Image (cartoon, helix red, strand yellow):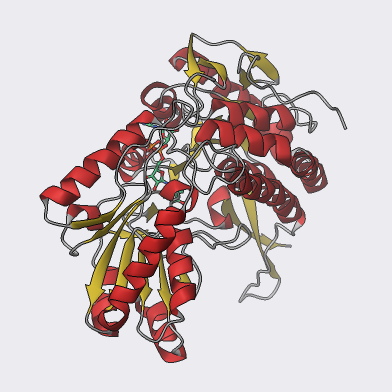
Amino acid sequence: MNRDPVPLVASALRHYINGAWETGATTGVSLNPSDLDEPVGEYVRADVRQTDTAVEAAHAAFREWSLGSARRRADALDAIGSEVLARRAELARLLAREVGKTLPEALTEATHAGQTFKLCAADALRAAAEPGGSARAGVEVDVTREPLGVVGLIAPWSAPLAIAAAKIGAALAHGNCVVFKPAESTPGCAVALASIISRAGLPAGVFNLVMGSGRQVGARIAAHPLTAAISFTGSAETGTRVLQAAAARQARVQLEMGGKNPFVVLADADLDGAVEAALTGAYGSAGQRGTAAARLIVERAVFEPFVDALQAKLAKLSIDHALKHGTDMGPVANATQLQRNLDYVRIGQQEGAHLLHGGRQLERATRGYFFEPALFIGESEHRIAREEIFGPLAVVLRADDYDHALHLANDTAYGLCAGICTRALERARHFRRHVHAGLVTINLPTTAVEYHAPGGGRKASAYGVTDAAFWTAVKTAYVAG
Ligand code: NAD
């Protein structure tokens, strides 16, 4: 295997367009949220013209790539997965520096990204043809799925390796060509992945990386007439804009958006397990995960012991530099997120919610976006219990009984995931059936989802199909004679 180093701090982080590393119209700097005095690197930003170049390169590469063999696609994806896995420690360190995840969290994500590419390699090999049949004698019906063309992939900063791997791997496995736009604050992770992909033997133009602002580069990818489909993960506000751009020209679109995920604890639950699952689900990766559960719904009989135990665990967390040994929670990822967390603490207090723990900016040896995880007791109608904050801030709501807990779980505009802790099989089954969410966890943190199973999401959390069908179009052929 070629052992070129993944570009790190000293390197300029460049676009990858039509098989070559390109400079950009302007530059920006990627910061380390644990230490603002140690930037991750300078990266280039595209304008509309350069974005068009990438889309056109992907369009030109589509014919050869889509008509090529599944074996070729599988081999390329397998090679990418192997190198991601072989270099996961290096990638994890970069991810920890760029997003502020602790090293164990970052290593989990890097591993997940490598395994996702391997899974996509296997998917590429699975038979594309589906069995068909005709009601008429002498006629064959043949149903096949064909690649779409150029797909625009627009990603958030929260899981820059895992989300990129899922989108890029699936798009390439199904024979599409890619224009990938990462979040502005994670160019290092994007360039590291592109560097690995550049060594997998793909024809020039099959994979393109373009960095820059959402308003310019992201909006142009979504609106470009040659982009056949857009897969977007990010906030509901941006997702709505992407949907409007896609709808205006009838392009296929898939949106994975925000959440305000409920986590229910019933009186019969294993309380220690429930507290641990709430801690992981609400505060893991500093609460900056689409699947984080920030709306904790606890049955009255165990409310006080649950809250006391969770508060005690929060008090013991070490919040510090993401790369420091013993850190339980790194900084939040950027200045906007820090300010958003502080604003919501103020909003919660103004609305009358009771702040039990945290909610302050913290100072550490390095200059970074450190925030003391916050725990509130509140009401369902409080903004902190309804609006997505995307930080280490959770609200506990009292439920009178199971029916009330289920009502509270569904009383949100979002529907990404939901969890319940209970020993009662009947309750668990009822919750699984009746909660309005695309992902359900039982006696597990809401974040305990796996890469090989479909994502999901309902209501304001998702739009369009999220499974393999998104990446191809059906063709049904009727053959006689
Ligand atoms: P964001 O919506 O601000 O940005 C997402 C991406 O869209 C970025 O690459 C951004 O540059 C781009 N963008 C911005 N404006 C655009 C426009 N007008 N047209 C096209 N693209 C544009 O989200 P974020 O702050 O990066 O990420 C946090 C959000 O992501 C949260 O809401 C979180 O819930 C969501 N998220 C969802 C999931 C899921 O699986 N559903 C997973 C992770 C994160």
Percent position of residue 62, x then y: 65, 32
Percent position of residue 149, x then y: 58, 37
**Quarter in which the C terminus is drawn:** bottom right
Residue 249, placed above or below residue 126: above
Q: Quadrant of residue 452?
A: bottom right
Q: Residue at x 58, y 37 (%)?
A: 96
Q: Residue at x 49, y 31 (%)?
A: 34
Residue 171, placed above or below residue 363: below
Q: Residue at x 18, y 64 (%)?
A: 379
Percent position of residue 142, x then y: 67, 62
Q: Nearer the viewer, residue 194 or 315?
A: 315
Whereabouts is ligand 1, in terms of quadrant? top left
Q: Please state if 313 lies on the left or on the right of 174 as rendered.
A: left
Q: Is residue 415 visible?
A: yes
Q: Nearer the viewer, residue 296 or 307?
A: 307
Q: Quadrant of residue 126?
A: bottom right
Q: Nearer the viewer, residue 206 or 88?
A: 88
Residue 350, placed above or below residue 415: above
Percent position of residue 383, x then y: 19, 53
**Quarter in which the N terminus is drawn:** top right
Residue 369, placed above or below residue 341: above
